[in-house]
Image (spheres, rainbow, N blue to C red):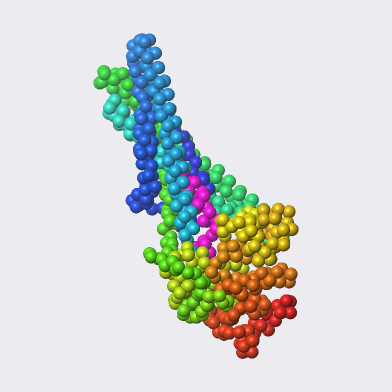
Amino acid sequence: MPPMGPPGPPPRGGHFLSEDEKNNRPKVTKELLVRIFSYLKPYIKQFLLVVFCIIISSVLGLLPSVLTGKIIDDGLIGQNLYALITLIIISLLVTLLSNLIGVLETYLNVWIAQHVTFDMRNKMFKHLQSMSQRFFTSNNQGDIITRMTSDIDGVQMIITNTLTSILSNVITLIAAMVMMFSKNPILALVGMALVPLFVLPTRAAGKTRWMITKKAQEAGDEINGILNETLSVSGQMLVKLFNKENYEYSRYEKANKRMIKLNIKERMAGRWFFVFLSTFSSVGPMLIYLVGGVLIMNYDSSLTVGDITVMVALLGRMYGPVNQLLNIQVDWIRSMALFTRIFEYFDMPVEIQNTKDPVVPSSNTGCVEFRDVSFSYNDEREILHNVNFKLESGKSVAIVGPSGSGKSTTINLIPRIYDVTKGEVFFDGVDVRKLDLEFLRRNVGIVSQDTYLFNGSIRENLLYAKENATEEDMIEACKKANIYEFIENTENGLDTLVGNRGLKLSGGEKQRISIARVLLKNPALLIFDEATSSLDSISESKIQDAIEPIIKTRTSILIAHRLSTILAADEILVLKDGVITERGKHENLVKMGGVYTELYETQFKAGLIQN
Ligand code: ATP
């Protein structure tokens, strides 16, 4: 009986399809195929060698079937022992050779797949690093990681499995057909008459499997979502504090159950068709026996029993590839969906990049000027409106204003985390968009509100700012940042591990380490986004003690929430709803009865008492 098996499982690399792809099968266009093959281009020699190996091993794989005819006719019926033994040995050698070539083919295949994905991963990482902050704030982190990992792993599987499977099945099919037709066209036609009957049911089964695959994909998304939310540091904290362990467990278990049900269904889809098909496909050889018998008995005396056996064996070798090619369609669609997903990321334009001939100023004074700057994150709402201010070299400015007034947004425009919508931001007298991006970012240092430390030691986090910093440099920076005393008292000193996101340290300690880090970077302009979250007064005064001397000696911008910081600055800008409403010195502003007075009464005064 020809080898008719149930449909093989679709690739389950855990790669996920977007909503759109789930509902619409991806369109396979010529451009898409050309683009996919462009990744194989650097390895074209190896790829051609694989194709050559597949051709040789497929043809060699068919030879034993042809030799069976000779074994029967010359060896058995002809009763020729020498011919029988020779043919058996040749048959075995051919099989051995075909398998050896198979090993080479697998090696080359894996090699190509690994190299293609290596290139793709590097390209994607580089591309993602060049994406703007807007991209990272609007896209789900899990989704970005999935594309980097399992989607690209999926590509590897496509090259090693789907592509080779298509190639070897097509070649085996063609070779079997050519051999059959050259042996006996009538019997070949008889054998092939049944092939169209496989097509319809297999297509229907493929459709069902695609639908189930889509649902399994959704269940996978859900599971990923639950894992992302609940197993993160902050997520787990929330779960614990709200006693939601059981709730989260049952949510996870439910999604998990849905997933296994769908997986079983997916594997079983179309199984009934194949019971029918397997039985039905055994009719093929019977038809060849029948028609072949009639031919031998009545018409074609040159046809032998061996010939008929060869035809039946070849038919068996042909049904296999037909079946597999029909089943490969789901894998194929998924593969195309994966490539579409990956290319979608590659096609996202790089929003913030160097201009053609970027300016690299010879000096770096750190002075900043905002000229009529307006900014909006999206079309919905303008956040900053016609902001104007100038910060001279060596001076400091404090930006104060109610929450959400646009303070952080303003400072993000300086190192081009975002670009202005209207107006210009100048750094060292040059529009930041014309400046060399590397120069700009090297010369602007920000201590942000939510400090981020990498998982590693304090030393590693400090060296991130200056690779070649000496022990003395680091100690000096830590002393200036008022954190050295703390480091000295830990068991491992600078080698103390800070934990995931620096969470093994207190908020104040993290802040001071990040101040030390920025001091090591030694930028021309220092921006300090003061944390709104209240630290205890000792921590706070340690931070104050660290930053006040820095403000006095460096060009700096401070987003200030505490009076002592505000008082240390040369000028105060009051921002409300994206507009600078007041500016000047504390003594004058506090008497104006405006936004500043209100802020002073409600926020800063308390800070004064605390300090
Ligand atoms: P706070 O003192 O609370 O930190 P802020 O004055 O620094 O506030 P911004 O963070 O600049 O305020 O935010 C200004 C406005 O821009 C807010 O209304 C906020 O909702 C909006 N906003 C901030 N970031 C984004 C973003 N990535 N996409 C869209 N809107 C944003």
Give 309 or 458, whichever is nearer the viewer.
Answer: 458
Which residue is pictured at 47% across the width and 72% down the height? Answer: 428
Give 135 or 57, whichever is nearer the viewer.
Answer: 135
- The boundaries of the magenta stretch are 134-156
Q: Residue furthest bottom?
A: 592
Q: Residue furthest front?
A: 472
In the image, is residue 409 above or below residue 267? Answer: below
Q: Magenta-highlighted stretch: main secondary structure?
A: helix
Q: In the drawing, does residue 116 fall left or right of residue 262?
A: left
Q: In the drawing, does residue 96 fall left or right of residue 263?
A: left
Q: In the drawing, does residue 477 fall left or right of residue 48?
A: right
Q: In the drawing, does residue 265 fall left or right of residue 327?
A: right
In the image, is residue 579 above or below residue 468? Answer: below
Give 153 or 215, whichever is nearer the viewer.
Answer: 153
| Residue 22, image x, y percentages | 47, 54
In reply to whether residue 150 is colored magenta, the answer given is yes
| Residue 571, image x, y percentages | 58, 81
